[in-house]
């Protein structure tokens, strides 16, 4: 079974940085793409960034220029470098992986931006 495990969340002051990681395991097939989403309590899940196999990356307008998504050489670990964080970035961040047309999700890691 495919498992995605996020790490790196926590409390950071406004203007600070965090780096999230997500490691995939248990997949028999190639991961087509990986991404990050975030969700506030009572709200829907919002797409943040995606990294498609082949190097293409895309970002939501709200994080463009501040966040950077990348994957390691194995393609099984995805990172999200978050800079210039604001309180509006506070959310549970979820890792996503697309494998043979199916989306898989991690359990999330909490990011809180507060002074």
Image (cartoon, rainbow, N blue to C red):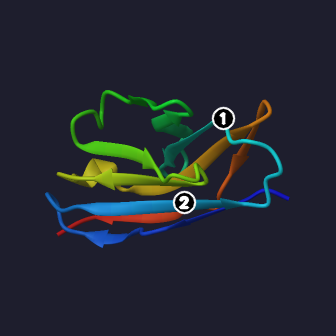
Residue 30 found in image quarter: top right
Task: Name the residue located 64 percent from the left edge and 61 percent from the top edge.
Answer: 107
Packing grade of label 1 (10 A; few <14, some 14-19, many >=20) is some
Answer left or right for 11 relative to 84.
right
- Look at the image and tell me in which quarter the C terminus lies: bottom left
Packing grade of label 2 (10 A; few <14, some 14-19, many >=20) is many
Residue 2 found in image quarter: bottom right
Please identify the residue farthest to the left as the structure is shown: 15
- Look at the image and tell me in which quarter the N terminus lies: bottom right
Please identify the residue farthest to the front as the structure is shown: 73
Vertical position of residue 113 compared to residue 51: above or below:
below
Which is more toward the observer, 75 or 95? 75
- Kind of element beneath mark 1: loop
Answer left or right for 62 relative to 4.
left
Which label sits on residue 32?
1
Which is more toward the observer, 106 or 99? 99
Q: Are marks 1 and 2 in contact (CB under 8 Å)?
A: no
Which label sits on residue 84?
none
- Kind of element beneath mark 2: strand
Task: Name the residue located 14 percent from the left edge and 57 percent from the top edge.
Answer: 15
**Residue 93 in picture, x, y percent from top left:** 49, 54
- Give the distance between the C-alpha atoms of the residues marked 1 and 2, in whole angstroms: 15 Å
**Residue 56 in picture, x, y percent from top left:** 45, 27
**Residue 23 in picture, x, y percent from top left:** 59, 62
Q: Earlier in the sequence, mark 1 or mark 2?
A: 2
Vertical position of residue 52 compared to residue 89: above or below:
above
Task: Name the residue located 22 percent from the left edge and 53 percent from the top edge.
Answer: 85
Task: Name the residue located 80 percent from the left edge and 33 percent from the top edge.
Answer: 100
Residue 33 found in image quarter: top right
Pointer 2 residue: 22
**Residue 99 in picture, x, y percent from top left:** 75, 39
């Amino acid at each position: 079974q495919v498992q995605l495990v996020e790490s790196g969340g926590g409390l950071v002051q406004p203007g600070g940085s965090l780096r999230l990681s997500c490691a995939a395991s248990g997949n028999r097939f190639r991961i087509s793409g990986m991404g990050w989403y975030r969700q506030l309590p009572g709200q829907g899940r919002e797409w943040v960034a995606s990294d498609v196999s082949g190097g293409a990356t895309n970002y939501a307008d709200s994080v463009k220029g501040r966040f950077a998504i990348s994957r390691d050489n194995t393609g099984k670990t995805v990172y999200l470098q978050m800079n210039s964080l604001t309180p509006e970035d506070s959310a549970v961040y979820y890792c996503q992986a697309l494998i043979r047309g199916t989306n898989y999700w991690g359990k999330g890691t909490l990011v809180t931006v507060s002074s």
